[in-house]
Image: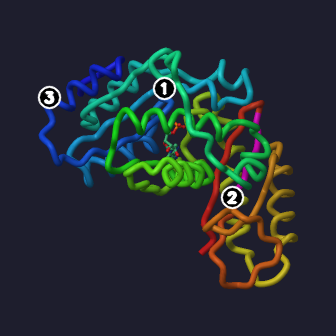
Amino acid sequence: MIIFKKFDDYKKYIKMLIPHGKRFGFIPTMGALHQGHLSLIEKSKQDCDITISSIYINPTQFNNPEDYKNYPVTIEKDIYLLEKNECDILLLPDMYEVYPKDFKSTDIVLDTMETTLEGKFRPGHFRGVCQVIERLLHVVSPDHLYMGQKDYQQCMVVKKLIEQINANVELKIEPTVRESNGLAMSSRNLRLTDEEKNKAANIFKSLLLIKNNMHKGNIQPVKMMAETALNNSGLKTDYVQIAKLKDLTIVDDWDGDTALIALIAATINNIRLIDNLPLQ
Ligand code: AMP
């Protein structure tokens, strides 16, 4: 694996050494890699000729300074894992590289994405995501961009970004990888004790509770049942919601037909976790 800290070095390398027509797969990350990230690398390896990953903890997407300060950093292990999984190129830029003095980003129209679910609880978060992904897409020019279903709303936001900046890239959304107890893998799980991880598995249990109790008509009671179960297990709930899969409009009455997704955000010991489950 070749590591580039400077984008210009990456661009020169690609231009000089990669034959024209090779397919590039890109996996942007914030590091502290786990099997969820590695599943994206694996998928890119299957589909593409060259797999590129980046590690950059993007300050502009953190609405909570404590969360940014405490974000886990395991760079040596990350490099080892990427090499073991045969990632071809790792971009490891610093802040000056990602946001140079003359940096300008497109003002993306995010509509309800900014006011609902994560958008509501993390003001400015998706603006930051758009900034960094726009910059990285511009540098990397991938054919495929791989992102995890775990951050489904982020995928929807990046879809809007791709459309609005007219980027010639295909977004591939890959399934959520889970621990054996159902907990969605996340870099933030590194900050949980074993006991907290067991408690956090109740997020997935609550999603399953929704899935198993869905019925046509008023679904508010199903949401409330899941929220009560979650609160009783010692987690602090930000939201338990059910929304349309296609655009994340919140649904209170279900026609029995529209494809839906259940989404949860909850905090345990000040560590905020999110997860979701498509209901069909
Ligand atoms: P992050 O490092 O948290 O920014 O995540 C980088 C990418 O990995 C994003 O596209 C995430 O959605 C994806 N990802 C994170 N956790 C998982 C998981 N458990 N399963 C699948 N993809 C994941």
| Separation of marks 2 and 3 at Cα, in angstroms | 51 Å
> Is residue 89 shown left or right of residue 97?
left
| Relative depth, front residue between 103 and 217 | 103
User: In this figure, which residue is indicated by the disc labeled 3?
Assistant: 16
| Label 2, ligand 1: CB separation under 8 Å | no
**Would you say the residues marked 2 and 3 are in contact, meaning their CB atoms lie under 8 Å apart?**
no
Query: What is the number of the mark on residue 205?
Result: 2
| Residue depicted at x 14% and y 28% | 16
| Separation of marks 2 and 1 at Cα, in angstroms | 32 Å
Q: What stretch is highlighted in magenta?
A: 263-268
Which of discs 2 and 3 lies nearer the camera? The answer is: 3
Residue 266 magenta: yes
User: In this figure, which residue is indicated by the disc labeled 1?
Assistant: 56
Sequence-first disc among 1 and 3: 3
| Residue depicted at x 25% and y 53% | 46
What's the amino acid at mark 2? Lys
Residue 40 position within the rendered picture, expressed as x and y whole percent measured from the top left: 39, 47
Sequence-first disc among 2 and 3: 3
User: Quarter-wise, where is residue 174 in the image?
Assistant: bottom left
Sequence-first disc among 2 and 1: 1
**SS for callout 2:** helix
| Relative depth, front residue between 8 and 238 | 8
What's the amino acid at mark 3? Met
**Would you say the residues marked 1 and 3 are in contact, meaning their CB atoms lie under 8 Å apart?**
no
* Magenta region, main secondary structure: strand
What's the amino acid at mark 1? Tyr
Residue 51 magenta: no
Q: How crowded is mark 2: few (under 14 residues within 10 Å), some or many (20 or more)?
A: some
| Relative depth, front residue between 125 and 110 | 110
Query: What is the number of the mark on residue 110?
Result: none
